[in-house]
Every structure is written in C-alpha cells, then in structure tokens.
Amino acid sequence: MTSKHIEAVVFDLDGVITDTAHYHYLAWKQLADELGIPFDEDFNENLKGVSRVESLTLILANGNQSDAYTDSEIEDLASQKNEYYKQLIQQLTPEDILPGMKELIEEIRSESIPVGLASVSKNAQTVLHALEIEHLFDYCADVAKIKQSKPDPEIFLTVCEALEADPAQSIGVEDAKVGVQSIQGSGMYAVGVGSYLEQADLMVNETTELSWTQIKQAFLHKQ
C-alpha cells in the first residue's frame, strides 16, 4: 500500500503548527484580571480547543459570575479578549513555527496529498500570514460557517468535504482532547501531539517526534 490511499491531512493550528496557546493565555488572563476572576495556567488547560464564547463562559463560571452579564455583554467581552490576542500575535514570525512542522507539511504536499486547516480560531489566516505558510494549505475552515464546536466533528468533516476527501481515508492532527474527539467522530485517523492524548490512534509527545513515514505506516497498517 502507498500514500495514494491517504486523501487528505488536516491540521489544527494552535499547539500543532505554532504555539499561540501562550498568547491566548495572556489575553484571557488580562481579561480575567479586569473582571476580578482568578485565572492561571492550570485553569487555562480547560480552554484548549474550545471556542471563544464557551471559554469565557467557563471563566465566568469559575468566578461565580455566570449570571453577571447579558449575551450582548459576553460577546463584547469575548471581542475584547480577541483584541488583546491580536495585539500579541503581531509578534509572530516564521521562527515561531513549531519544530519540524513546515518540513512535515511540505513532505505531505510533495506527494500531492491535499492539506487542510481545522482551527476554531477566527485569527487563523492572520497567524498563517505572519508565519508565512498560507501557501501550504489547500483549504482553511471558515469558522463563521461552523455551527458546532469541537468535540463535534463538523469542522473536520467540512474541511474533508472541501478537499473532496473521504474522512475514512484522511488524517487529522490535534493537540487537544476535544480535537482528537472531533477527528475520531468524523471517522478520520487521529494523530495526537501531547502525552495526555492516549485516546488518539497515534500519539507523540511533541512535534519533533512527528514523522510522515511513521504516520503513513501507522495509518495504512490500521486500514
């Protein structure tokens, strides 16, 4: 069997291609501090792969402020967090691509396998542009059109459909548990980056351990 059986590879962005997670943390912490809500890196783990408004809902609940704001005010607060985040990611350069990821994507593309992005970030295009790797992706999910957040499989199914790929013959790469659940719910093969992702079909501790040869062999062996 050869790689021609793989119809697409779809990546998450934050924590997989670049580590913008720390910028998200700093932006959420700035907002939480303004709201008088305790916020630390441990609590921030709960927000991985979760949409902006859902993240804010969790933060407000943690500060016993679930009923303190109207839906409109919550949207405004979420937008304020995004402004903080956008200011922070202006610092990104191609040096911020996680080790080995650009080479991995280029190797996949060299085999004429479509590459997609399934990020819940509304700033994904801005980040790709800053990293100077927009050209490496054949399709990026339009978050405005995605109705269900991860762990719902909608975003991965949408990217596969756009790439004209059968999810059962495609691979997803994630660093969050909800992301891995989303991949597996779509019927795709799940590669997890992080030692806490035992439920993934293939797990590595960090991006430096990702090998296209290993991923292909593991995927084709499971077929």
Image (cartoon, rainbow, N blue to C red):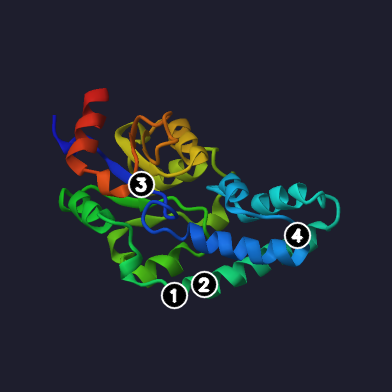
Earlier-in-chain disc, 3 versus 2 = 3
The residue labelled by disc 1 is: 91
Q: Quadrant of the N terminus?
A: top left
In the depicted structure, whether residue 30 falls above or below residue 139: below
Q: Is residue 185 visible?
A: yes
Seen from the viewer's position, the closer of residues 164 and 73 is 73
- Three-letter residue code for mark 4: Ile
Earlier-in-chain disc, 4 versus 1 = 4
- Tell me where residue 130 sits by quadrant: bottom left
The residue labelled by disc 2 is: 88
The residue labelled by disc 4 is: 74
Label 3 or label 2, whichever lies nearer to me, is 2
Disc 4 to disc 1, C-alpha distance? 27 Å
Seen from the viewer's position, the closer of residues 35 and 169 is 35
* Residue 198, x across and y down, in percent: 41, 30
Earlier-in-chain disc, 1 versus 3 = 3
The residue labelled by disc 3 is: 10
Disc 2 to disc 1, C-alpha distance? 6 Å
- Tell me where residue 139 sits by quadrant: bottom left
Tag 2 near tag 4, CB within 8 Å: no
- Three-letter residue code for mark 2: Leu
Q: In the visual, does 84 lie left or right of 214?
A: right
Seen from the viewer's position, the closer of residues 141 and 24 is 24
Label 4: few (<14), some (14–19) or many (≥20) C-alpha neighbours in 10 Å: some
Tag 3 near tag 2, CB within 8 Å: no
The furthest residue to the left: 1
* Residue 43, x across and y down, in percent: 62, 48
Seen from the viewer's position, the closer of residues 30 and 67 is 30
Label 2 or label 4, whichever lies nearer to me, is 2
Disc 2 to disc 4, C-alpha distance? 21 Å
Name the residue: 52% across, 72% down.
Answer: 88
